[in-house]
Image (spheres, rainbow, N blue to C red):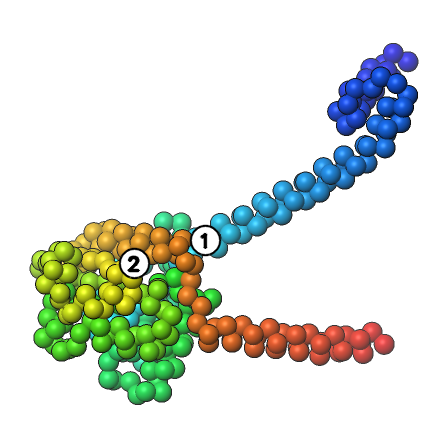
Amino acid sequence: MLSLFSKISWVPDAFKTFTGPLTNVKQYCEGMTRIPQHIMGFSKAAASADRYITTTSRLHIQNTELRLILLGPSRGACVCLRDSLLGYSAGALVVEKESTTWRARVDNRDLTVIETPDLLGTSLGVRQRAQEALRSLQLASPGPHAVLLVLPTTYLDEVYQISARDLLSKLLSLVGEEAANYVLVVFACVNPRGASLSLDQLLEEDYLGIKAALSMCGKRVELVNISPGRSMDSRMVEGRRLLDRVIKMRAQQGHYLHKFLRREDEVRTQLLNNMAVLLAQKLDKMGK
């Protein structure tokens, strides 16, 4: 008998935890009625906490991803920047006619880099340029965190005879004017000797008329030294510095959602619903 009481001696203390101290039979009865409420409240709090943990974990997983689109008049500069971001050589300098997706795991983040063909040049027809611009957005679905306009720091003004403002205007005509908030101008030093002007010098000299272009995209600009003569480790340091800038942009405004992607999501949802109805009808007939 004593052993039985010792085994259940915890019950009064547990009871008090739910009901508070008891002084009479009335309080006892009221306390009994409160126990289910406490249990239900605890269950709801636990469920809410579980949902919170699940949601925050999911957001944490999603927040590790970065999606970038590279555009520029110089294929070589874009390739050098692509490799510097990825941390490896993703292929030789080959002129592509379609947008290409490259992926890497960088500092515990999933990085997606969309390399575009000559969207700002004249080698593609109008329809192909339009198609590849939309394809690049689709490959970066649900949307890019940044669109990098890559400009070499040497000889571009002499070779292309075009201003940075004109290049940015072409870019926005392809991916939408709203994308201006997601454009990051990247001056890329690809001089084999590694020498280049500083960012302050480029801005002071108004290289390529850059000041007019920056006024269109929130004055976001970076300079990276990714010359082929430098080691990959050195170029990766520059690439990670650039990714840090993109992370800040993402934290401020998320990703760019083009109306094409909105429409695509709507069509996909509608198709899913229609197919679900057809499948349900098929299953009903099989059940009969």
The quadrant in which the N terminus is found is top right
**Separation (CA) of disc 2 from disc 1:** 18 Å
Tell me if mark 1 has few (under 14), some (14-19) or many (20+) residues whose alpha carbon lies within 10 angstroms of its own: some
Q: Earlier in the sequence, mark 2 or mark 1?
A: 1
In the rendered image of this protein, does residue 227 appear above or below residue 36?
A: below
Residue 30 in the image: state x and y as whole percent: 86, 28
Q: Give the image quarter of residue 192.
A: bottom left
**From this viewpoint, is residue 192 visible?**
no
Instruction: Classify mark 2: helix, strand or loop.
Output: helix
Label 1 sits on a secondary structure element that is helix
Q: Position of residue 58 (x, y in %)?
A: 54, 52
Residue in the image at 51% along x and 76% along y: 263
Q: Quadrant of the C terminus?
A: bottom right
Identity of the residue furthest to the top in this view = 2
Q: Residue at x 30, y 88 (%)?
A: 125
Q: Residue at x 84, y 27 (%)?
A: 31
Image spot of residue 140 (x, y percent): 42, 68
Q: Residue at x 27, y 60 (%)?
A: 220
Residue 85 appears left or right of 48: left
Residue that mark 2 sits on? 85
Q: Amino acid at mark 2?
A: Leu
In the rendered image, the vertical position of residue 38 relative to residue 76, given as above or below: above
Mark 1: amino acid: Asn
What number is the disc on residue 63? 1
* In the image, residue 209 above or below residue 27: below
Q: Determine crowd level at label 2: few under 14, some 14-19, many 20+ residues with C-alpha closer than 10 A.
A: many
